[in-house]
Image (cartoon, rainbow, N blue to C red):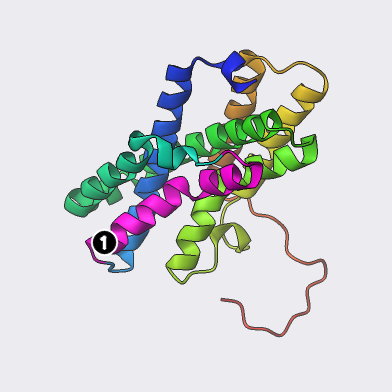
Amino acid sequence: MLQQLFSPSVQHTLDLIGIFVFAISGALLAVRKNFDVFGIAVLAEVTALGGGLFRDVVIGAVPPAAFTDLGYFLTPLLATALVFFLHPHVERIQTGVNVFDAAGLGLFCVAGTTKAYDYGLNLTASATLGLATAVGGGVLRDVLANEVPSLLRWDRDLYAVPAIVGATMVVLFIRYDALTPFTSALAVVTAFVLRLLAMRYHWRAPRAWNRRSTVREE
């Protein structure tokens, strides 16, 4: 199905763009944590490829694309070099990086959902793996950097929710035989715009109803 929506060259280009911007976010966090160059590279690779690796292992698409396409492996290293030498400049364009990261989120949740369905998973499982594809690398990044994953923190702008919306749109389009390049792009744009709006207006998920916890907030 994925091959019917986009040509292989377009798919590959979109994948590399998403991988690059995710790798930038991982490398920047490594710099903030004062990691050495190896640590920067590891965090860039994990952030960029972690979600896709998890999806491919679960659906049995082995060896995963990250190990069969040299471009997938080298792109995070390019991001590592860029951040290693130019991180003060990259930090200054953090807003732009966040915009591209939002675009990568939209692309990966749609591509991940579609690929999972192609490998025989049901609609719910496909949407779940689409979400994992989009946010899995960020979770691994935060765990390795000894931080609570961003998508679990109440004080961070919505991240997983836009990916859930995008993945849900895809499975609904599949269910009603309406998945086309146009509707796939619509799902990508919807997730992208929701993430941008969440960043702009600081939308956050609600905490427990009538919360009375005495645990100190962090």
Residue 117, x across and y down, in percent: 70, 31
Q: Nearer the viewer, residue 20 or 61?
A: 61
Label 1 crowd bin: few (<14), some (14–19), many (20+), radius 10 Å: few
Residue at (48%, 63%) from the top-left corner? 142
Task: In the displayed orientation, state which residue is furthest to the bottom.
Answer: 214
Question: Magenta region: which residues?
Answer: 36-61
- What residue is shown with label 1? 38
- Asked whether, in this view, residue 113 is left or right of residue 67, the answer is right
Q: Looking at the rendering, in which quadrant would you find the N terminus?
A: top right
Query: To which quarter of the image does residue 151 belong?
Result: bottom right
- Asked whether, in this view, residue 35 is left or right of residue 128, the answer is left
Residue at (78%, 79%) from the top-left corner? 212
Residue 184, x across and y down, in percent: 63, 22
Q: Compared with residue 154, is residue 80 higher up or lower down, i.e. above or below? A: above
- Report the amino acid beneath label 1: Phe
Query: To which quarter of the image does residue 171 belong?
Result: top right
Q: Nearer the viewer, residue 212 or 191?
A: 191
Residue 111, x across and y down, in percent: 58, 31
Q: Per the image, is 54 magenta?
A: yes
- Give the structural element (helix, strand or loop) at label 1: helix
- Asked whether, in this view, residue 188 is left or right of residue 175, the answer is left
- Asked whether, in this view, residue 143 is left or right of residue 42, the answer is right
Q: Is residue 201 visible?
A: no
